[in-house]
Each structure stands twice: as C-alpha cells, then as structure tokens.
Amino acid sequence: MVKEVEEHRGGKGMRLGKYELGKILGEGNFGKVKFAKDTETGKSFAVKILEKKKILNLKITDQIKREIATLKVLKHPNIVRLYEVLASKSKIYMVLEYVHGGELFDKIATRGKLPEKEGRRLFQQLVDGVGYCHDKGVFHRDLKLENILIDGKGNIKVSDFGLSALPQHSRSDGLLHTTCGSPNYVAPEILANRGYNGSTADVWSCGVILYVILTGYLPFDDRNLAVLYQKITRGDVQIPKWLSPGAQKMIKKILDPNPVTRLTIAEIKVDEWFRQGYIPSNPNDDDDNVYVDEEAFSLKDVQSEGELSPGRPTLINAFQLIGMSSFLDLSGFFEKEDVSERKIRFTSNLSHSELLERIEDIVTGMGYRVQKKNGRLKVVQGQKDQKYSGNLSVAAEVFEISPALYVVELRKSYGDSSVYRQLCKRLSNDLGGSGSQELLTQQCLIQAAEAVPEVC
C-alpha cells in the first residue's frame, strides 16, 4: 500500500514511492494521467490516478477491475503495457507504459489521410495487437482512433481496455450482450441487441479505423444518432475510387454488416494487400508478472455520493436512449409521441430534485396523491373527499443524460386515456426544456453519445 504521506512534494515535484510525478498528460471523468519517472532507473512512465470516490459514484468498480485484470495478461509490443498497480485509501495508481507520440486521432486530424503504405503498416500492427488480444480471450469493444496511441518510432499502441470483455462475460449462448462502444465505430450486430461475437465486433471497428487512416474521414457519420445507426445497420459506406483495388476490397469485406460473412483476423492476415511489407509483431509473454496492490479495491472506507443520495437518477447512455424508442426511429420519441399510449417521455433542463418536486406539486394540485419509492414517483387517485380528474395510476421516473439534461418518463398503469393525456400535457408543458423540440432531441442525443464509452 502507498500511504497518503508517501505522495508528497519533493525537490522537483510530487513523489509516489520511487516515482517522481510530473506534468498532467490527460484528464477524464475518473481522474488524471501524469508523466512519471522512476528515480532509480530514469525510465519514463504514465501514471493513471483514479479517485476511489469517483469510481464509486460512477459505479464503475467492475470496469476498473476489468481493465486491470485484462492489462495484466496482455504483453504485446502493440498494446500499452501495465507495469504495476499501487494504491492509497483514496486513490488507485496504474503505472503504465509512457507513449509520447499522442493519439492516432491527433495524427489524422493534423495530417489528414495517410499514404496507403504508411496506413497499411499501422493497420497491420493494429490487427496484430487485436488478434493477440483475441487469442488471450480478450475483446476490446471500444476500438477507435482516440484509443490508439503512437510511440516515438511511429508504432501503434492499443490502449483503454475499460470496456473489454473476457470469455466469462459471455452468456449461455456464447455471445456478449452488453451494448457499449463509441457510436461511429460500433458494429451493427451490437445495435441489433440480440447478442454478438466480441471478435467480429472488434474487426468491424478495425475496419472503421482503416477507412479513416486511408481517407481522413469516418465511413459512417451523422449528427443525428438515429440516422447514424441506420447507416451502420445497412452498411451504408461509400468507398473512394481513388483507393487501390486491394484497399477497397479489404474495407468492403471488413465493413460487412453481416458478422457471419465479415472477414476474420485470420482471413485479414492472409490477404494479398495486407501482406505487403508485413512484419509480424512478437508478444512478450515471458516478461515479469504485474504487481497489483491488494489495497487497490479496498473501498470500505470510501463513501460515495450515492450513499448520501439514494434517490440519485439513473444515468443512461446513447445506446439505451436509442433503445427506448422503436428501432432507431426517433420521429415520435419525445412530446410528439401519442400520449394516449401507455408511455411518454420528454426532456427537461431542470435538476433531478427540482423535477421530482415540481411533478409532485403539479399532480397534487390536480387532486392526485403521490407515493415515493427509490427515487421514483407513483401518481394515484386522490382521497374520496378530494376532487380529482378521474381514476388513474401513473409511474414517473427521471433519467440523467448529462448533469444539465434529463428525460422524464411517464408510464400509465391503468386509467382513462383522456385523463392521462391531460396530465402528460400539463407536465410536459410546465417542465419541458427550453428551445425547439428538434434542438432538444439533438442536444439529448449528442450529450448521450459522449457518455457512451463511460457507461456500459
């Protein structure tokens, strides 16, 4: 265990055991990544510093455990290496390989598309790294340009295994069922929500990355997520004619919406275009074991905000949001939905607590009673001596899209449709967010999309 006092400011900077911490390399929802130097050897590292309280609040303990367990077994030149995991009472410190060339995303954003020879070399390394993962039973599930790093020699390093899956995560049908990934890179079978093979889903994402490397833009893109997912499901991709026939063929066979006929890693490796100048990468499986401090996941003394606020709203991501509507069709998703039906949703910019309070005030003012349980409300008919608008039972729940945007869902258990319509209209008019409905829908989807890699 690394005691809190051991992270102190020395002559040159913060110290963590034998590591001297330097500048911040990046920041995320879970914590920071800092440059570090081993004071004994002078070797450079990147230290991912995770706040235990945030891990609890975001309910991602299993995700962090999965990432560490995965990186422990992955020792390949094209995968970011984990060296050790240290811990204190409030933080987890992942000591990682320092890759100072930045993200592949930045490389493409700066230079645009890469020459085919250079792009093929990076793709070869990507396939080697991903294939190695699959041989170890690891499926990444969030392959994208931002998770591909470039080292000082121009070689790639696959990073961020927070959404990875192992064989034990499959169900009895042998398939994975968790809907996760990043919208532009996700495979169509994941969107279908009927189970998917982790290997073929990763191959699809590799195909998207290859397309961007060689063209400078995404094969599937649209500001409206529903439209984007329709394009992905159809495999609606335009392959530039100026690419070589071999590259066009490779992209077409990988971005096949049918996972059964999509190219496999083994088939990619024997392809004539792929094998040009191919130098296979050799894994480093004989290296030392990774040390993990047993204190890393000792969370008994860490209190989450959730423990203080049991009524905290459910956080949903873009995939779940799309799933709330009929298959990829948002045409009647929010207030435009026919409120004579049993379920209606509308967006609001009010806070979670404000929404619940306002809903209670409005419905009690209309003569109904409110029952509260686990952050949800149930609207039922009033007392016999009260005037109310009819016999009705409605459940109300609030979902968080982002700290500034919520979805209110109303579900009718029983009662008169005209009375239900009256209640829904009153609530949506009084509580709905400002701005046009189209703008609200787009804002909701965009902010939900940003949450996808973190909520799975």
Image: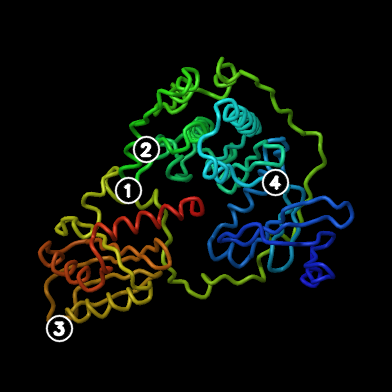
The percent position of residue 164, horizontal first and vertical second, equals 57, 43
According to the image, label 4 marks what residue? 99
Specify the amino acid type for callout 1.
Asn
Q: Is residue 415 left or right of residue 146?
A: left
Q: Earlier in the sequence, mark 2 or mark 3?
A: 2
Instruction: Look at discs 2 and 4 and give the one toward the viewer.
Output: 4
Would residue 173 be seen by someone viewing this image from the given angle?
no
Q: Disc 4 marks which amino acid? A: Val
Q: Secondary structure at mark 4?
A: loop
Eye-nearest disc, 3 or 1: 1
Tell which of 233 and 438 is nearer to you: 438
Residue 224's disc is 1
Residue 386 tag number: 3
Residue type at tag 2: Ala
Q: Amino acid at mark 3?
A: Gln
Q: Nearer the viewer, residue 428 or 450?
A: 450
Image mark for residue 425:
none
Tell me which residue sits at (77%, 46%) in the image.
290
Tell me the mark number nearer the camera, choosing from 3 and 4: 4
Give percent across and percent down for residue 294: 75, 57
Query: Marks 3/1: CA distance?
Result: 46 Å
* Of 374 and 263, the residue lying toward us: 263
Circle 3 sits in a helix, a strand or a loop, which is it?
Answer: loop
Q: Quadrant of the N terminus?
A: bottom right
Crowding near the residue tagged with mark 1, few <14, some 14–19, many ≥20 C-alpha atoms within 10 Å: some
Determine the image quadrant of residue 365. Answer: bottom left
**Disc with the residue nearer the chain's start (1 vs 2):** 2
Is there a contact, CB below 8 Å, between mark 2 and mark 3?
Answer: no
Q: Which residue is found at the position 54% from the left and 60% from the top?
A: 59
